[in-house]
Image (tube, rainbow, N blue to C red):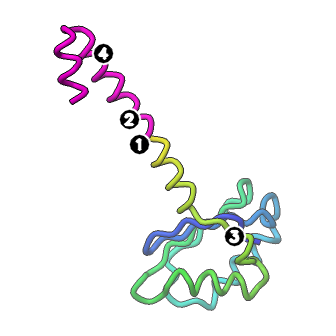
Amino acid sequence: MIVYVHDIPGRLRVKIPAIKGNSKGKRKIEQVFQGLEGINEIMINTATGSVLVNYDCRVLKSSSILNALKKHGYSQESRTVTADPYIEKQVSKAGRAIGKALFSWAIGEALEGSALSFLAVLI
């Protein structure tokens, strides 16, 4: 089953725990992609369970690759996670941290001067 998908046009990475430490699983994944036209390169890392597929996005769509994996029992859409929620969470965290830092800096600058400077920052 695929547990993680990261997709940019022409490059798809999936994590498949079933192939982690499994050389037979690696061969099965290679067979899944043999019939797909548009695949440029497949890199399978059995140490991490990661499959990286470089493909020609003019010939093949990532959905076709994922469907081929699904057809062979490697995907359950309800249990697959994409990178989108993770990225959104990290961007949100970064935004909050930057906002706090800027606010702290502004308050520090305002308090260094007179009370009038402090009021100017607040306004």
Mark 3: secondary structure? loop
Query: Of marks 2 and 3, which one's residue comes earlier in the chain?
Result: 3
Q: What is the CA distance from the residue labelled 3 to the residue labelled 4?
A: 46 Å
Q: Quadrant of residue 74?
A: bottom right
| Pointer 2 residue | 98
Going by the image, does 108 lie left or right of 92?
left
| Residue pictured at 30% horizontal, 15% vertical | 108
Q: Quadrant of residue 14?
A: bottom right
Q: What is the CA distance from the residue labelled 1 to the residue labelled 3?
A: 27 Å
The kind of residue on which mark 3 rests is Thr
The magenta stretch is 96-123
Query: Of marks 4 and 2, which one's residue comes earlier in the chain?
Result: 2
Q: What is the CA distance from the residue labelled 2 to the residue labelled 3?
A: 31 Å
Q: What is the CA distance from the residue labelled 2 to the residue labelled 1?
A: 5 Å
| Pointer 1 residue | 95
Residues at discs 4 and 2 in contact (Cβ within 8 Å): no
In this rendering, is residue 10 above or below 68?
Answer: above
Residues at discs 3 and 4 in contact (Cβ within 8 Å): no
Residues at discs 2 and 3 in contact (Cβ within 8 Å): no
Q: Nearer the viewer, mark 2 or mark 3?
A: 2
Residue nearer the viewer, 4 or 49: 4
Q: Which mark is residue 43?
A: none
The local crowd at label 3, few if under 14, some if 14 to 19, many if 20 or more residues have their Cα within 10 Å, is some
Mark 2: secondary structure? helix
Whether residue 51 is visible: no
Mark 4: secondary structure? helix
The kind of residue on which mark 2 rests is Ile
| Pointer 3 residue | 80
The kind of residue on which mark 1 rests is Gly
Residues at discs 2 and 1 in contact (Cβ within 8 Å): yes
Mark 1: secondary structure? helix
In this rendering, is residue 26 above or below 71?
Answer: above
